[in-house]
Image (cartoon, rainbow, N blue to C red):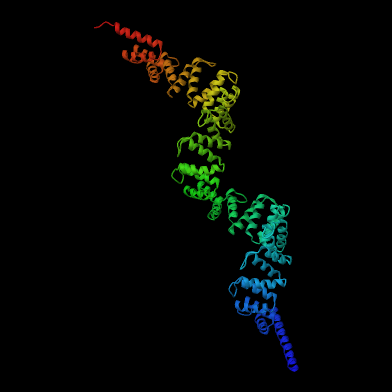
């Protein structure tokens, strides 16, 4: 019995020596990159049960080194070694079960073998145990156990575990949120080159999370990650270059990094890159490239890109003008609640561009934009309600939206709001509010508002009467060629109100307005020349301006023009022309012209004598209260009555 045991012991020692020797032969061959020979010796030792040889043989089957790649064989030999307690085999076996390599996926077996290796202190195995608990792969999610295993691996310097642990602290997964600890572990991982950790470290520096804000450090970490191809880091780095944060402003480098991220499909980078080409930042303006990048981002659903793409179609920037496509992309962006797109979409419907005119749809989208305080939308809603477009005229709602836009600084809305308060439309008449809004618009150089402000000062409505202020505002508008203001300014010079009386200045401003066919200015100019008010009397010029006013159908001008032809003032006496102008005025119920027409028919001046027509016109004038006409009528009628019968 003792001999047998001894013999057995001697045989066991020989076998152990042989398999170790075989294993060592494999190691030597492998180190010399003689993989075929290494595989031979490893297999020889593995068959004898040498765990390290089994593990190394599994690796060679896995990688196809010196032997045909065979995942099932790799799994087989890993399992043999793992069952003997080899931590490397246990780790790799867990990896194969987790990722379904050479076997069906089995998270429970993966966890079993990862835990075996983890208990040996293998950091990578500890990380994978943490991952399975974190993700709940084959088991329930358990953040507490995940954190425990991540921490073990992180302390050993595993960068993936450090990143995962930091993420849990940052996002309060199984632990109270702690930016300081998150930053600590992100930076540990980042220092080992983990690209995501570098990104996160940069982000925390940029946003003062767990560390004092430091744009320069953020820049450094973003740059490290960007150079490793991380698209978010590339995008953030571009932002820092663009906004001069942590580095001097450099649009060219911003453009470069936006493009790197854009080429990887980052939509925000595509939008910003398009904007830089659109606005010539860091590059020559290039609408075609801007259009290309906006289109890429727009097709990915980015609302800003959709909005800007529509603008480019609308204005023919980098593409042929196409209102239909502008409408299409505005609607896409509008449905994502982009206020400018909502306003511009409404404009297309309002103005029938790329679509039939539709005030209902215009109103719908203007209201959406108005909700975002887009002033143009508020103003246009005021217009729709004021004009009764797609609705009955509604002054109350018109005033509501006009006033909203007015308070946003829209000058036309300020003017319209003032007009409604002045006239009492949609509200009680309120001269004070009218004055306030006219003043707002006037200060923005709205000429009509300046005229109305002058009017309110002149008449003391909504403000104390002040001729000097009236003069000031009329003068501003007059200098901008407002006929109404020129007329009012001339009147102030004529009457000496708010300014020293000056007939020559009055004449000057009347002439400016009259030259633009302002009827009242033409009449006043004619009066001044006719009467020689502060200037030399000049019947010819009076005649000229009366004629200009008469051609605008002024019955007063027609009357006076008739008189000047009748008596020969500024022209040769001309009864026919006198008659013609008197007739025009008479037909507009000008009483003196009716009398004069009767007179000319009675005496055959410029027209054949006509008793009946003389009676007709005298009668019309008499009925309107003209005493001379009544007297003439009575005499004519009496003459006819007293005329002897033949």
| Residue 572, visible in the rendered structure | no
Q: Quadrant of residue 73?
A: bottom right
Query: Quick check: 101 above or below 610?
Result: below
- In the image shown, does 66 or 537 lie closer to the viewer? 66
> Which image quadrant for residue 449?
top right
Q: Quadrant of the N terminus?
A: bottom right
Q: Is residue 479 above or below residue 200?
A: above
Q: Quadrant of residue 455?
A: top right
- The tally of labels here is 0
Quarter of the figure with the C terminus: top left
Q: Residue at x 42, y 23 (%)?
A: 553
- Give how far across and how far down residue 313 sits, in percent: 50, 48
List x then y, in percent, for residue 367: 52, 42
Q: Nearer the viewer, residue 128 or 240?
A: 128
Farthest-out residue, left: 646
Rendered location of residue 198, percent (x, y): 69, 60
- For residue 214, side relative to residue 419 (left or right): right
Residue 588 on image: x %, y %: 40, 20
Q: Can the viewer see residue 616 in this picture? A: yes
Answer with left or right where residue 634 lies relative to residue 156. Answer: left
């Amino acid at each position: 019995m003792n001999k047998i045991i001894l013999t057995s012991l001697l045989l066991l020692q020989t076998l152990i020596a042989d398999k170790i020797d075989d294993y060592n032969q494999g190691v030597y061959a492998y180190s010399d990159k003689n993989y075929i020979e290494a595989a031979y010796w490893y297999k020889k030792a593995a068959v004898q049960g040498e765990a390290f040889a089994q593990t190394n043989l599994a690796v060679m089957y896995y990688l196809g080194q010196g032997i045909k790649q065979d995942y099932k064989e790799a799994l087989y030999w890993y399992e043999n070694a793992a069952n003997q307690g080899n931590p490397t085999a246990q780790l790799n076996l867990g990896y194969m079960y987790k990722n379904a390599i050479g076997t069906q996926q089995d998270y429970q077996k993966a966890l079993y073998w990862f835990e075996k290796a983890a208990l040996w202190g293998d950091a990578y195995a500890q990380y994978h145990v943490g991952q399975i608990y974190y993700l709940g792969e084959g088991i329930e999610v358990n953040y507490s156990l995940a954190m425990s295993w991540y921490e073990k691996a992180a302390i050993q310097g595993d960068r993936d575990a450090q990143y995962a642990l930091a993420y849990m602290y940052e996002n309060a997964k199984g632990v109270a949120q702690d930016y300081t600890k998150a930053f600590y572990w992100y930076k540990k991982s980042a220092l080992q080159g983990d690209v995501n950790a570098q990104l996160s470290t940069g982000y925390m520096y940029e946003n003062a999370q767990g560390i004092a804000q430091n744009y320069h450090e953020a820049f450094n970490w973003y740059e490290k990650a960007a150079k490793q191809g991380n698209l978010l880091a590339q995008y953030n780095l571009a932002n820092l270059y663009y906004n001069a944060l942590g580095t001097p402003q450099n649009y060219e480098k911003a453009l470069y990094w936006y493009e790197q991220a854009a080429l990887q499909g980052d939509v925000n980078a595509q939008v910003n890159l398009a904007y830089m080409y659109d606005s010539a930042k860091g590059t020559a303006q290039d609408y075609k490239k801007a259009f290309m990048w906006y289109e890429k981002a727009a097709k990915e659903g980015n609302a800003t890109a959709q909005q800007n793409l529509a603008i480019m179609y609308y204005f023919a920037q980098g593409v042929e003008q196409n209102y239909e496509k502008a409408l299409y992309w505005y609607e896409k962006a509008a449905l994502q609640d982009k206020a400018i797109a909502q306003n511009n979409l409404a404009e297309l419907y309002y103005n029938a561009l790329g679509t039939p005119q539709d005030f209902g749809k215009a109103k719908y989208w203007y209201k959406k934009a108005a909700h975002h305080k887009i002033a143009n939308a508020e103003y246009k809603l005021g217009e729709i309600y004021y004009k009764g477009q797609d609705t009955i005229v509604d002054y109350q709602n018109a005033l509501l939206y006009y006033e909203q836009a007015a308070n946003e600084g829209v000058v036309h809305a300020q003017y319209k709001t003032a007009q409604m308060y002045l006239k009492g439309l949609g509200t009680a008449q309120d001269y004070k509010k009218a004055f306030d809004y006219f003043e707002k618009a006037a200060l923005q150089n709205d000429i009509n508002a300046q005229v109305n402000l002058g009017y309110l000062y002149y008449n003391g409505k909504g403000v104390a009467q002040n001729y000097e202020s009236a003069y000031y505002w009329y003068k501003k508008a007059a200098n901008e060629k407002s006929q109404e203001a020129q007329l009012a300014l001339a009147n102030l010079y004529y009457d000496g109100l708010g300014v020293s009386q000056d007939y020559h200045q009055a004449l000057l401003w009347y002439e400016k307005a009259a030259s633009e066919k302002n009827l009242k200015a033409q009449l006043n100019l004619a009066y001044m020349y006719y009467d020689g008010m502060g200037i030399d009397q000049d019947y010819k010029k009076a005649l000229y301006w009366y004629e200009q006013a008469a051609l605008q159908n002024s019955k007063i001008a027609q009357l006076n023009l008739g008189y000047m032809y009748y008596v020969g003032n500024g022209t040769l006496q001309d009864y026919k022309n006198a008659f013609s102008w008197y007739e025009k005025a008479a037909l507009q119920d000008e009483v003196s012209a009716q009398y004069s027409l009767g007179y000319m028919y009675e005496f055959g001046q410029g027209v054949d004598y006509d008793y009946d027509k003389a009676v007709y016109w005298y009668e019309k004038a008499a009925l309107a209260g003209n005493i001379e006409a009544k007297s003439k009528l009575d005499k004519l009628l009496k003459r006819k009555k007293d005329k002897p019968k033949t």
